[in-house]
Image (cartoon, grey):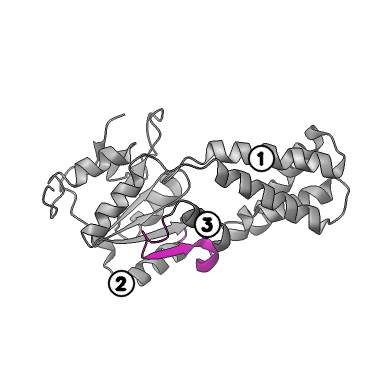
Amino acid sequence: MSLNIHTADTALRAPQAIIFDTDNTLYAYGHPHACATVAAEEKAVRLLGCEVADVRQAFSQARLEVKQRLGRTASSHSRLLYFQRGIELLGRKTQLVITLDLEQTYWRTFLAHCELFPGVREFLMALRSRGIGTAIITDLTSQIQFRKIIYFGLDDCFDYVVTSEEAGADKPQEAPFQLAIDKLGIDPERIWMIGDDPASDIAGARRFGITTLLRVDRAHNGHARESAPDLVFDDFEELSRYVFSGKVEGWAAQ
């Protein structure tokens, strides 16, 4: 899939800051999650003496219960809560040690299988060299998302990080976007948002007049039309070539 520009009337204008999503924007979430899920399930089978099908069903049900109870909040994504409730659904009551063990197993395995998309680090460094501000808006709890950023070695690439735990709400609610804008101290019309989710990243950012860039997988054939991102891309190296080629208003070719 080639890079597509959706701004018909005006050229993209160089930003003073860019806000990034993390999961499926800076790296692919699916493979690490699948590996981590299997590792946690296998450990639960050993520690609890249950069948794998029962463990899988209990953890799936637990996830649904937690999300329904907590709504669009950071803790609704908590593996710790999923595992705690899953064990209870298996009839084992609350098992704190096993719950903590499963959560550590999940995230240790997850991180071991994570890999940044090609060109991400180079793009961030190019922004740094041009004095462009950077921030992250990401759902989930702060401790886990901080670990991901540090694991990738990107902790010195972002000026600010906003998690839904800190903001008190997940995207696309206004709170995390407003908090990031406040931290950056920049007019939203001079900010870009790069994310992978049309409903959360793109729609949420557009409410503030932020220019939106949607990252899609190469196999993805479209995007949510109602979100209408200003630019769609599938490769950070391609994006970097475009934005630094002189085609973006206010950025001379390098």
> Residue, x 41% and y 58% (percent of image)?
136
Question: Around disc 3, counting alpha carbons within 10 Å, would you say few (fewer than 14), some (14 to 19), or many (20 or more)?
Answer: some
Q: Percent from the top left, x then y, of residue 24?
A: 46, 43
Q: Is residue 157 magenta?
A: yes
Q: Is 60 on the left-hand or right-hand side of 124?
A: right
Secondary structure type for disc 1: helix
The amino acid pointed to by label 2 is Gly
Q: Percent from the top left, x then y, of residue 196?
A: 41, 44
Q: CA distance from mark 1 to mark 2?
A: 39 Å
Q: Which residue is mark 3?
A: 145
Q: Which residue is mark 1?
A: 37
Q: Residue 56 occupies which quadrant of the picture?
A: top right
- What's the magenta region? 154-173
The N terminus, quarter of image: top left
Question: Around disc 1, counting alpha carbons within 10 Å, would you say few (fewer than 14), some (14 to 19), or many (20 or more)?
Answer: some
Question: Around disc 2, counting alpha carbons within 10 Å, would you say few (fewer than 14), some (14 to 19), or many (20 or more)?
Answer: few
Secondary structure type for disc 2: loop
Q: Residue 113 occupies which quadrant of the picture?
A: top right
Figure check: 191 above or below 102: below
> Residue, x 41% and y 46% (percent of image)?
26
Q: Is 15 on the left-hand or right-hand side of 144?
A: left
Q: Percent from the top left, x then y, of residue 250?
A: 13, 55
> Mark 2 and mark 3 in contact (Cβ < 8 Å)?
no
Q: CA distance from mark 3 to mark 2?
A: 23 Å
N-term-proximal mark, 1 vs 3: 1
The amino acid pointed to by label 3 is Gln
Q: Which mark is residue 185?
A: 2
Q: Nearer the viewer, residue 101 or 11?
A: 101
